[in-house]
Amino acid sequence: MRVLVDVGHPGHVHFYKHVIWRLQECGHDVLISARDKDVTLGLLDHYGFPYRILSSMGDGLCSLSREFLQREWALLRLIREFKPDIVTEVGGLFIALVCRLMKRPSIVFTDSEPVPLDKYLTYPFASIICTPDCFLRDIGSLHVRYAGYHELAYLHPEYFQPDPTVLDELGVSKDEPFIVLRFVAWKAGHDLGQYGFSIEVKRKILQILSRYGRVFITSETCLPEEFEPYRINLPPHRMHDILYYARLFMGDGATMATEAGILGTPAVRSSSLALNMGNFVELMHRYGLVYSYYSPIDALQQAVSLLEQGDAKSEWGGRRERLLAEKIDVTRFVCDMLEHYSTT
């Protein structure tokens, strides 16, 4: 089997990495096409994956539109050259239409309901669309639901074991509490019109949470000089180890909040998309692992409440075990889908 995997976000590298290794172990030929965004290429290099760069992320509506056309043309040429039996991508925006034109099957994995272009450029053209079973939309006959989250493809205990040496690299002792803050850029195509924390709110969060332990910041964008001493300077592949040992996570993005919760770390997020995704409705109301709020003040109050609750971390461990007992091996599911539909 010849498989083309298109990755456009750091989280997609993690989602597919165990899938790629398993496919290669089974003798399949895997090619990765990549988008230069954030630390995506750095992660691919770290894991030793060869890849083809098809585009760099645009900035603003005109730039994103130009990138989309550039990437579609580059992908069309790559499919013509590689002749894949199946093409897959998280989100599916770039592959669905091209694969339909090239008469190649495409499998899309998505967990994001608020993406406005999906109903025009992804859903009508993809061969199969796979989502978590808590997905809030019904996409139709091509929709396959599964009991899991994207993040379980790499953070399930089957695939991830935390490395405590990260504490030495951070410069914190074993019992020293620390907090991770995550600020996203809000520049992706599906982020247009959406927002997270303002600079003023970021200052307030940093000021208040610093009373409860050391604060480390990971940010997609440049920050004012006053924030720089708090920025994490470790390689991006160490982020999951950091999240596992943190006392609390707070941010305005989606992926890292889910990662923290699944790792058993109390997680609080706030954005204009707080509960617009089934993942976050379930993670909040069924499992109590990730609290999502539209109001940053409500989110900050919840974060402080959790920090003042001394046993929150151990309580989250029990909640995490319940989630793991009810979810599937997502990596195996992805491999099975690719192998099955490449032969149909």
Image (cartoon, rainbow, N blue to C red):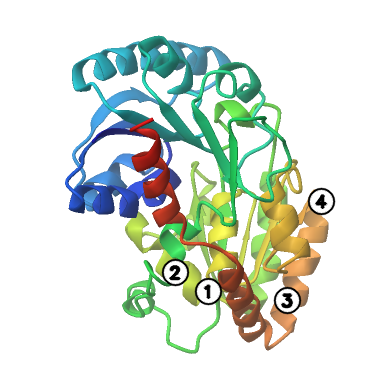
Q: Disc 1 marks which amino acid?
A: Ala
> CB atoms at circles 1 and 4 under 8 Å apart?
no
Secondary element at image label 1: loop
Check whether the beta carbons of the residues at disc 1 and disc 2 lie within 8 A of each other: yes
Q: Quick one: label 1 or label 3, which is nearer the N terminus?
A: 1
Label disc, if present, on residue 242 of the rendered structure? 2
Nearer-the-camera pick, 64 or 68? 68
Packing grade of label 2 (10 A; few <14, some 14-19, many >=20) is many
Secondary structure category for the residue under label 3: helix
Q: Is residue 144 above or below residue 83?
A: below
| Residue 118 position (above or below residue 167) | above
Where 233 sits versus 48, above or below? Answer: below
| The disc label shown at residue 314, or none | none
Disc 2 on helix, strand or loop? Answer: helix
Question: In front here: 44 or 169?
Answer: 44
As measured in the structure, the alpha-carbon distance from the residue carrying label 3 to the one carrying label 2 is 18 Å
Q: In the picture, which quadrant includes the C terminus?
A: top left
Instruction: Residue 241: name its quadrant.
Output: bottom left
Relative image position of residue 292 (x, y in whole percent): 74, 56
What residue is shown with label 1? Answer: 246
For the residues bearing labels 4 and 3, Cβ distance under 8 angstroms: no
**Is there a contact, CB below 8 Å, between mark 4 and mark 2?**
no
* Amino acid tagged 4: Ser
Name the outermost residue toward the front. 344
Q: Which residue is mark 4?
A: 295
